[in-house]
Structures are given as C-alpha cells and as structure tokens.
C-alpha cells in the first residue's frame, strides 16, 4: 500500500510539473500598455453600455440594442448600415461603431458625432433631424442637450455655437490668458473650464490669467534647431496665476464676470448652478488652503449674494466636489466634506436659512441648517445620482473596506445605507434616469469582471450581461497575497501586496523589489482583479523576484488623519512605513536581505530616491522615474497644500531637498525622465545630477526625448525593458 501511495504522489507531482511547463511565460508585450498583446490579456468588457431612460443601451460595432432591465430581453434599435445610409443622404460622413453614441432625450433620437458634425438621428424614420458643425480645431467641447449649444475652445479663447449654427467668439484674449479651460493645474477636482446652466441658456467659464507666471523653458528637440516651448509653471512660494469666472449669455451676446474681489492667491473651485439658473455657487479657497468658503453669486449681475458655509482646518481643506441640489426639492443641496475626518455627505436647507449682513468688508453670511447624512470611519467616494421616488441618493463608498468601492443607496431622512450589488470588489456603476437600476461593472481579486443590471431597491433579479473568464489562465501566474502590517506609529494597519516568484521554491533565496508610490490621492492595493497587481510586477516575479507594495500613511481612501500625517514633512512618515515593509521582507526566509531594490514613479520617484539615500545600507538598487527632488521646484497648488510655502516651512523644505543628501548614495540608482515633463520638470533631476557630481556619487540617467511625465505606446515597452535590465544587471 505504501508503495502505491508513493507512486501516486510521484505521478501527481509529475503531472503538476508538466501542467506548469505547458503554461505560457509573460512578455512585456503581454503586460504593458502599448504592447501588441496587452489588450488580449485584459478582462473582457462590454463597450458602449449606457442608459436611455430606464432602458439599457448596448452599442456594439454593427448594431445598437436595448436591454430591458426587468427581464433582460434584447431588441435591436438600429444597425450601423442604417445609420451610415442616413448620414450619406446629408453628406455628414459616417461612424464606425456604436460605442460612443447616446440617446439623451425621451424621443427615439440618437446623438452621435462624425469627424465634423454632431447629429441627431430619428431611429424610427432613419432620418437626420438636426446637425451642428464642429470646427476642426475645437477643443474642450461641452455640449448641452437642453439648448443644443456647444461651448469649445480654439487656442486660448472660448467660442459658442448655438443650435441654429450661430458661432460666437466669446473671448479675445492675449497670450498668457486662457479661457474655457481647466484651471489651477487640475487640482480641487477641476477637470473642465465650462459650465452650462440647467437650461443651457447661460454659460459660466473660467478665465485664467497666467501672464505673470514664470516660464519654465521646455525645449522641443525634434525641430532642425531646438525650439523653446515654455510652460507656465508656478513653483511653490512663487507668483501664481489669477482666475476669474465669466458668464456668457448667448441670447444677448453679453459676458459679465462674478464680482469675487481680487483673485490674487485664491482658488475658485467646484462651480455649480442653482436649479433655476439664477445663481452660481463657487467654493473659494485661500492660497494656504486651510479656509474654504461656499459663495453664491447672481448669475445675471455677477454680484456676490452670500457666503453659505465655511470650513477651516489647521493643515488643509480640500474641496473636491460641487454642491448637488436634490431633484425633488430645489431648496436643499448636498455638500461633501471631510470635517469629521472622513469624506461624508451633508444636507443643507436653504429654505430655513437666515441671512446676517455684516457691516465690515466681506459677504453677507447665510446661516443654513445642516444635517450630516452619512457617518462612519469610511469615505464617500462619489455621488452617482438619485432615486427620486424613494428619496435616496446613490453613492460609491468604502463602507465595506478601504480596498473596495461599492454602491449604496442612502436614505436622506435616516442616513441608513443599503448595499446594491455584490459585497466584494471594486465597482463602477451607471444609474438609470429614474434611479431604479444600475449598470454594475466590477472586478475583485478572484473575479476578472462581472457586469449586470441591478435594481437599486434590492428587490428583483439581476440581469447578468457578462461573467468574464480569467484572461491569464494560460500563463504561469505567481502567487499573489494580501495582508496587513502595522505602520511605524505602532497602531495603524497598512495593507500590503506580496507577489512570490513563479515556480516558487521556499528553499531558495530571492531578490526583492519594493514598488512604491506613497503620495496623496493614490492607492496601489485594491480588491480588483489579482489585487490590482501591476503587469511589471508579474513580469519580475517570472524572472525570480519577490515583489512587495505597501500603501503607507499619506496615501488615499483611509481618511483625513491617515493622509495628512505627512503634512509639512513629505517623505518622512512614508519612508518609516515603507521600512516596515522591509522588515516584513527580511522576516521571510526566502528573501535575500542583501538584495533589496526599490522602484517608483513621480511621488514614487521621490520616495525611491529618498529611500536610496536615507536607508543606503538597505537598498542595493533603485530606479526612480520622473522624481520630485526638491519640493521648492514643484507646483504651487499640490506642493503648498502638503508642504505650505518654502517661506513658511523652510525646515520642511530643507529636509525634503534630496540634493542636500546626494553624497549619501551608495547603491546603484537610475533616474529616468521624460525630456519635456510638465509635472516634475527636468530641473529636478538635473539639479540632483549636479549635486551628485559635486559630492562624488554616480547615479545613472536616461531621458525619453519628446515625452512628458509618463511614457506611452512603444516608449512604455522600452521603458520597462530598461527598468528590468537595470535590476537584472545589479540586483540579480
């Protein structure tokens, strides 16, 4: 019997080895964006899912279908051939798929774009009922479905084309002044520069005067003689741009500007309209970013009407979201705030507000009753929309876990939350017009992707649209585990992700690499497919490396205290936490403690360089991409939020200036940048090279000509070939 058991064990082991040998090995072409097989190894998705009222639209290449959310029944609305035949009758070009079309009205009207036109097509009649030309150079397009007016920019100026085709140049500014574009370097949740009123008859827009901002001398080396193409780049503590908000009325062709006072050293964020289109709301922030005020302006005159709310914090206040009015009550709106330590919803009641004029210079103060709606040691990540009948707001939150993003319905009277959909994973949802259904698209560590239509009431069945197979099942996958360690404060749990080498042997000693970011507004470890492991981590695990990532204090989605512990001393607490990750690695008997490397990009490049200098006996090899070297050379909005100004915090800036410690470099460090990086400008790394030369240390350096802060396309493949080879040469 013993012989038989031994024989079976040998057979099983042999079979297992043969199966592993049959598996494929990854290449960078498989794992990196820009690789020729990258998209084939991403979980299958369904493009072009959206809502038409409470009917789900599925836009494929050849046809557009509706899906009944009650029973899943599909019906073809129109085919690609029928659309293009109708467009041909008007010489309006053609479309190649239905991925980006929509049906914004109750009528069966299809909204689509060709190269030069925006078009409404009657689905039943197969006829074009309206079209609007799109200027060839139009950028930052913002179309309003109510008025069918289009706002856009050409160069640095703003234009509007009305539904009848009348084009107006709204602004005529000199160089150095931008209109209708995103401002404040996309901080504070800003991602656009135009804001239509609810009826689309008025347009608010940003005007940013940056003529006083210092030019950073970027150089275009692709011309016969290199050409100077400077960026406006306000560095910490230096003169910043000035922003104002205009309001254009297409019917009168008149523009007024909100009378907000001197825009010097102020941020104007989260612009929104009242439901009646009579008022504009703006969250205004001082340059110190520790005092936010919600202001209301008259949209017709620009007069300042009232200050509705203000919030202060000794470190910083960071408004990220405009107010949202309840669709069933125009006197109430939702404001998002971290004032209790976590981002939550607060309901404001304008109907019961009391105005208190003050005689000194400043706005009237409108005291408004407020009610905190959501509470707990978790954050509201976004507001998806409303279920008007149920008087519920639909949100995405981390209530289940900071690693997840789940949909919840929140009762606005009680604050009680109800989970919508699966309790696992990271979800992205679209809400139907009535709020009765969501399209739920999610992944989890063991779920490649699932897409379904789910009733928000919690009653009724889910219509499954996709349950994707694991796309990497044919490849040799390493073991990926998730766990927690204590932060350097001895009490806070930090999440880590550990990837063991492919064909792991516990009796071997492996080199280890820590991949690090570590900065605000980022989270590396989530409950997504394979715990969100990066393609390069899989590639290096295949080459025999242990890969570790730790989300240290200072990263996102864990609450205000977790993030702002790094205030005025970027790099200090973050490195302490990363060294707890090193302790974990050293506790593993299969990790070679003499072969530990580190790699990161941007803030992670700063962390990589800092770790190589500060813990130079621990880290043997590092690759720092696009690193911040000296926070005095970083931009105003982000840098001053977390570090204050160099004038106010000289010690903090001095301690985080890595040029001061260039002589501490012992290991092999390669710095990689894009030659025209507008985020971490090349001056950072060049200054570090000079400091290293003066100190007698020898980092390596590589530049991608013409690239910005990140490499894309084939450059990204080349980049990771280079990073890999550096660790192979010096850590393996």
Image (spheres, rainbow, N blue to C red):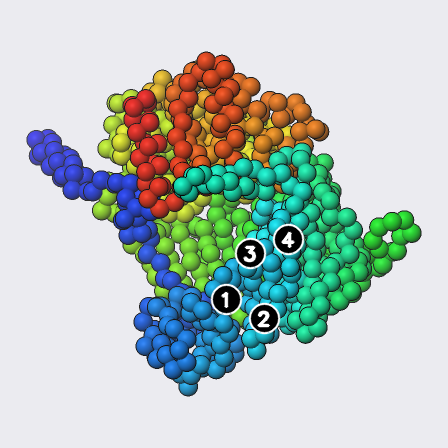
Marked residue nearer the N-terminal end (2 or 3): 3
Q: Which residue is mark 2?
A: 167
Quarter where residue 647 is shown: top right
Say if residue 656 shows up in the picture. yes
Q: The N terminus lies in which quarter of the figure? A: top left
Q: Secondary structure at mark 4?
A: loop
Q: CA distance from mark 1 to mark 2?
A: 10 Å
- Residue 78 horizontal/vertical position (percent): 37, 78
Marked residue nearer the N-terminal end (4 or 2): 2
Question: Tags 1 and 3 in contact by the CB under 8 Å rule?
Answer: no
On the picture, is 4 further left or further right than 464?
A: left
Question: Tags 1 and 2 in contact by the CB under 8 Å rule?
Answer: yes
Question: Tags 4 and 1 in contact by the CB under 8 Å rule?
Answer: no
Q: CA distance from mark 1 to mark 3?
A: 12 Å
On the picture, is 269 further left or further right than 546?
A: right
Marked residue nearer the N-terminal end (1 or 2): 1
Q: Which residue is mark 4?
A: 174
Up-down relation of residue 276 to residue 522 (above or below): below
Marked residue nearer the N-terminal end (4 or 3): 3
Q: Residues within 10 Å of mark 4 (few under 14, many from 20)?
A: few
Q: Which residue is mark 3?
A: 155
The residue located at (68%, 70%) in the rendering is 253
Name the disc covering residue 135, or none: 1
Q: Nearer the viewer, mark 4 or mark 1?
A: 4
- Residue 228 horizontal/vertical position (percent): 51, 40
- Residue 20 horizontal/vertical position (percent): 19, 39
The residue located at (73%, 59%) in the rendering is 257
- Residue 74 horizontal/vertical position (percent): 36, 75
């Amino acid at each position: 019997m013993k012989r038989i058991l031994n024989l079976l064990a040998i057979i099983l082991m042999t079979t297992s080895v043969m199966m592993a040998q049959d598996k494929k090995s990854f290449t960078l072409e498989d794992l990196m964006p820009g690789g020729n097989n990258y998209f084939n190894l991403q979980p299958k998705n369904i493009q072009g899912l959206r809502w038409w009222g409470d009917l789900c639209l599925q836009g494929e290449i050849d046809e557009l279908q509706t899906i009944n959310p009650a029973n899943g029944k599909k019906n073809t609305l129109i085919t690609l051939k029928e659309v293009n035949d109708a467009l041909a009758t008007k010489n309006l070009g053609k479309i190649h798929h239905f991925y980006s079309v929509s049906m914004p009205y109750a009528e069966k009207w299809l909204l689509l774009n060709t190269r030069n036109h925006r078009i409404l097509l009657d689905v039943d009649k197969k006829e074009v009922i309206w079209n609007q030309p799109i200027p060839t150079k139009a950028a930052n397009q913002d179309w309003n479905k109510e008025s069918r007016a289009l706002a856009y920019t050409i160069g640095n100026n703003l234009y509007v084309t009305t539904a009848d085709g009348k084009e107006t140049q709204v602004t005529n500014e000199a160089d150095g002044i931008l209109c209708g574009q995103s401002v404040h370097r996309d901080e504070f949740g800003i991602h656009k520069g135009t804001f239509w009123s609810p009826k689309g008859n008025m347009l608010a827009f940003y005007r940013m005067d940056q003529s006083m901002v210092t030019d950073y001398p970027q150089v275009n080396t692709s011309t016969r003689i290199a050409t100077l193409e400077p960026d406006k780049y306000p560095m910490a503590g230096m003169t910043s741009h000035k922003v104002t908000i205009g309001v254009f009325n297409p019917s009168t062709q008149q523009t007024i500007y909100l009378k907000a006072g001197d825009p010097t050293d102020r941020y104007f964020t989260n612009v929104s309209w009242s439901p009646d289109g009579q008022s504009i709301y703006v969250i205004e922030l001082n340059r110190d970013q520790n005092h936010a005020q919600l202001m209301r302006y008259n949209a017709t005159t620009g007069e300042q009407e009232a200050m509705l709310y203000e919030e202060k914090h000794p470190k910083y206040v960071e408004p990220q979201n405009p107010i949202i009015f309840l669709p069933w009550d125009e006197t109430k709106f939702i404001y998002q705030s971290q004032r209790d330590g976590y981002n939550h919803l607060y309901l404001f009641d304008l109907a019961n507000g009391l105005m208190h004029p003050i005689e000194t210079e400043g706005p009237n103060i409108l005291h408004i009753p407020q009610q905190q709606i959501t509470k707990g040691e978790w954050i509201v990540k976004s507001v998806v929309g409303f279920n008007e009948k149920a008087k519920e707001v639909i949100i995405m939150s981390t209530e289940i876990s900071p690693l997840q993003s789940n949909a919840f319905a929140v009762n606005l009277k009680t604050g009680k939350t109800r989970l919508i959909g699966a309790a696992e994973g990271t979800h992205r949802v679209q809400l139907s017009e009535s709020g009765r259904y969501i399209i739920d698209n999610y992944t989890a560590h063991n779920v490649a992707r699932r897409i379904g239509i789910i009733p928000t009431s919690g009653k009724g069945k889910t219509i499954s649209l996709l349950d994707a197979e694991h796309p990497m099942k044919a490849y040799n996958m390493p073991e990926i585990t998730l766990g927690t360690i204590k932060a350097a404060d001895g009490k806070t749990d930090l999440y880590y992700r550990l990837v063991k080498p492919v064909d792991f042997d516990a009796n071997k000693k492996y080199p280890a690499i820590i991949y690090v970011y570590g900065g605000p507004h980022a989270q590396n470890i989530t409950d997504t497919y394979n715990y969100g492991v990066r393609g390069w981590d899989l590639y290096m695990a295949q080459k025999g490396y242990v890969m570790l990532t730790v989300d240290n204090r200072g990263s996102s989605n864990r609450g205000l205290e977790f993030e702002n512990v790094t205030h005025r001393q970027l790099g200090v607490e973050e490195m302490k936490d990363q060294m707890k990750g090193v302790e974990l690695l050293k506790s593993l008997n299969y990790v070679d403690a003499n072969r530990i490397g580190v790699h990161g990009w941007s803030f992670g490049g700063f962390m990589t360089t800092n770790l190589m200098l500060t813990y130079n006996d621990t880290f043997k090899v590092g690759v720092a991409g696009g690193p911040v070297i000296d926070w005095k050379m970083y931009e105003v909005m982000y840098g001053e939020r977390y570090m204050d100004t160099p004038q106010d915090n000289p010690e903090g800036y001095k301690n985080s200036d890595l040029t001061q410690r260039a002589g501490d470099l012992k290991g092999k460090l390669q710095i990689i940048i894009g030659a025209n990086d507008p985020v971490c400008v090349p001056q950072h790394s060049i200054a570090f090279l000079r400091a290293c030369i003066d100190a007698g240390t020898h980092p390596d350096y590589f530049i991608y000509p013409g690239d910005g802060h990140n490499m894309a396309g084939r450059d990204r493949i080349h980049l990771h070939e280079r990073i890999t080879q550096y660790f192979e040469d010096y850590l393996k």
